[in-house]
Every structure is written in C-alpha cells, then in structure tokens.
Amino acid sequence: MHGFPQRALMGLLSIGLTLSGCTQVSTNAYDAIADFEATAKTTYTWQVEYVPRSISQDRPNDRRLEQFDATTVANINGIRPEAAGSGPDSQGLWWPVLPPEPTVDAIEERQLKGETPRSPEVIKSIDYAITFNKAGESKTLPTDYDVYRQAVKAVEKNRPLALTLGPQDKSVLQAEIE
C-alpha cells in the first residue's frame, strides 16, 4: 500500500509534464468560420484477404490483404458534401458512393501461387484534420472525432475555438468552444 500513492503521484506528474508540452491556440472571435476548417474524410475501400491453401505450423497466420477501388468524400465543418452518397450517419458524417466491387478477374490477377482469395469486403475509414491559423500561418493537423464535432458545433454557433495542440504541435488534442 505504501508504494501506491507514490505511483499515483508519479502518474500525475507525468501527465502534467506531458500536458505542459502542449500549445494553446485560439481562433479568431470575429471571423470564426473563416479561421478554421474541420475535415472528416470518409472512405470506402474494397479489400480482399488472400490466405495460403495449406497452413504450416511455422507460419499459421500467414495472410495478405490487397486493396482495390476506393471512394472518398470530404465532410467540411459538418456540411453535406455534394458528392455524398449516404448519410448523415449516427456520428453526423456523410459517406461517398460505394466504389465498384472488384471483379473475379481483378481478384485472380493479384492472387499468388498457393493462395485462396476470400470474399471482397468493404472497409470504412475516417481521417480527421483541422486547419487553422497560428501566428498568421495556416496549419493543417490531424485530430480525432471529438475535436471535429466541437468544430462543427462552433461553426453552427459562429463561435471561435480554443485548440490544444499535441507534443511538437503535430496534432490537435482538444477543442473547446469559446
């Protein structure tokens, strides 16, 4: 029991030191919408898994993934993109039109000797980013769903954002409506 408070204190100090390396940035209160742009790129990708016909004991989990056609649409500030095929979903995101399914010829073309292809699957992916001005310079950094949603809400309310940047200003960790 004696070591637990010390470990807890060390954990808090570690968190404090990590957060102290973060930078705070505020967007312009007078022109909030022009000062930042939150993007969620939604993508559908056809993927086929190729597995060996005979599984050996030294490599029981060998498998190979091949990606085929993909379609992407950019959700900007929560506004419906013109190219949207469906949505909004339960997270308020719009999705592209489904790309064409790979043909049997295309699947067999990529098949290696000794492999069997599985049925094609559609893989969904989302990449979040936010663009903002920092010291007069436009920056685009990766972020997550929570920051994207805060930015969408800020746009709807025509309010600025306070952004918390990650270590070395390589990502946006948090956004708060001001």
Image (cartoon, grey):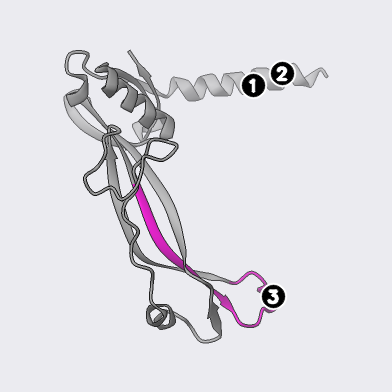
Give the residue displayed 19% in from the left and 31% down from the top: 138
Q: What residue type is labelled 2?
A: Gln
Which quadrant of the figure has residue 7? top right
Provide the residue designation for mark 2. Answer: 6
Residue under numbered circle 3? 58
Residue 155 % position (x, y)? 27, 23
Kindly check if marks 3 and 2 are in contact, taking CB atoms under 8 A apart as contact.
Answer: no
Up/down of 61 relative to 72, above or below: below
Give the image location of residue 42, x and y in percent: 35, 47
Comparing 15 with 96, the one in front is 96
Pointer 2 and pointer 1: residues touching (CB < 8 Å)? Answer: yes
Q: Tell me the magenta residue range.
A: 42-62
3 or 1: tag closer to the N-terminus: 1
Closer to the camera: disc 3 or disc 1? 3
For the residues labelled 2 and 1, the Cα–Cα distance comes to 6 Å
Q: Distance between the residues labelled 3 and 1?
A: 43 Å
The amino acid type of the residue labelled 1 equals: Met
SS state under label 1 = helix
Most distant residue in the right direction: 1
In this view, 160 is above or below 117: above
- Examine the structure image and report whether residue 46 is included in the region drawn in magenta: yes
Q: Which amino acid does label 3 sit on?
A: Asp
Q: Distance between the residues labelled 3 and 2?
A: 45 Å
Are circles 3 and 1 on residues that touch, CB within 8 Å? Answer: no
